[in-house]
Amino acid sequence: MSLPRIAVIGTGGTIGSLGRGPFDIADYASLGKVMDAEQLLAYWPQVREVADVVAVKYSAIASTAIGPAQWLELVSLCDRLVAEDPSLSGIVITHGTATLEETAYFLSLTVKVEVPVVVVGAQRPSSGLSSDAGMNLANACRVAGDPRARGLGALVMMNDEIHAAREVTKTSTSRLQTFRSPDFGCLGHVDADAIAWYRRPLRKLGRETEFDVRGMSSLPRVDIVYCYAGADSAAVDAFLAAGADGLVSAGFAPSFVTPAMAERMIAAMSGGTPIAASTRAGSGRMFYTTRMREAGFVNADNLNPQKARILLMLGLTRTRDREELNRIFAQY
């Protein structure tokens, strides 16, 4: 049986990094040695036992340097790869873990290709003792080549687990099991003998969404305001002065903010700036209480602040109407 043909786009990050030796699993970034996709596949030739891999050079940078401009480029790159090679079974994007969940969620909402897109990283550099890089890369290629992965949006494969981009988040600085889906758990497991699927996401994804960013060169600016005891309106004022098109409130669970922040946010919303209410808790729905509704907040549901920011950015490419934005957050 022929192996699935998988395009591997390299964006850098820990998975492609090389340290000073097997025990350099923390300070490797200071060395500045990051492999591109071709070099990474040469470093882990075992991946070719599970897939017919095609290396796609993109970048070799830390994920702290990846943002909306790169997201738009990756959407276009995925389109081009599938158009140029109809034999592709899937696409794997190697990525640093710092912003991996954000890139994956953006792609999950915007990529229109029919083949699976799997985003993968590593907690230890390829050169580290007991690195997770090689196995993660191989397993990501296995998932991307599985027909059952189609129609699930962009997926995240880490530590033998398959996660929905909408739900997954990084929960630990250095543990291998850092990527978790707090509210609902993973979609399935990538085991030695088989890929075992257990559930599917229900929210709209990929080709089903109303977001078409192809041809766009930029996205609306949305900033996150983190709430803490005694917080005043300084951050809100600063983001608005910087030209924010919208804001996300990372409020106290289940969504409230300090009186000073609330007063300034209500004024901003009255002036036409949409603000989505999320929480800093890391899990659970935002309660759309009478107070939050009457104040004018958009309900971010159970999205964490960084995911709510992405959906609000995309929502603002379609509308600024609060009820329409609420519809978008309820559907996606």
Image (cartoon, rainbow, N blue to C red):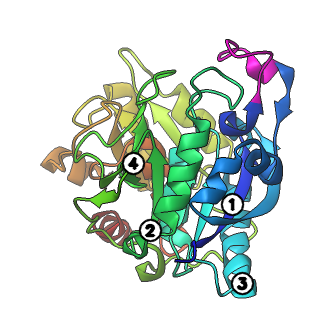
In 3D space, how far apart are the residues under numbered discs 4 and 1 (Cα atoms)? 21 Å
- Left or right of 98? Residue 35 is right
Q: CA distance from mark 1 to mark 2?
A: 17 Å
Q: What residue is at 67 percent from the left and 81 percent from the top?
A: 82
User: In the image, what residue type sits under mark 1?
Assistant: Val
* Pointer 3 or 4: first along the chain: 3
**Mark 2 / mark 4, whichever is N-terminal:** 2
Residue 320 among those drawn in magenta: no
In this picture, which residue range is highlighted in magenta? 18-30
Label disc, if present, on residue 192 of the rendered structure: 4
| Image disc number at residue 153 | 2
Which of discs 2 and 4 lies nearer the camera? The answer is 4
The three-letter amino acid code for the residue at tag 2 is Gly
Residue of label 3? 85
Q: Quadrant of the C terminus?
A: bottom left
Q: Please indicate, yes or no, whether residue 99 appears anywhere in the rendered image.
A: no
Q: Residue furthest front?
A: 1
Distance in Å between CA atoms under marks 2 and 3:
20 Å
Q: What number is the disc on residue 8? A: 1
- In percent of width and height, residue 53 lies at 69, 64
Looking at the picture, does residue 65 appear above or below residue 111?
A: above
In the rendered image, residue 27 lying in the magenta stretch gets the answer yes
Q: Could you tell which of marks 1 and 3 lies nearer the N-terminus?
A: 1
Point out the residue furthest to the left here.
290
Per the image, label 2 sits on a secondary structure element best described as loop
Name the amino acid, label 4. Ala
Point out residue 301 in the picture as x, y percentages from the top left corner.
27, 52
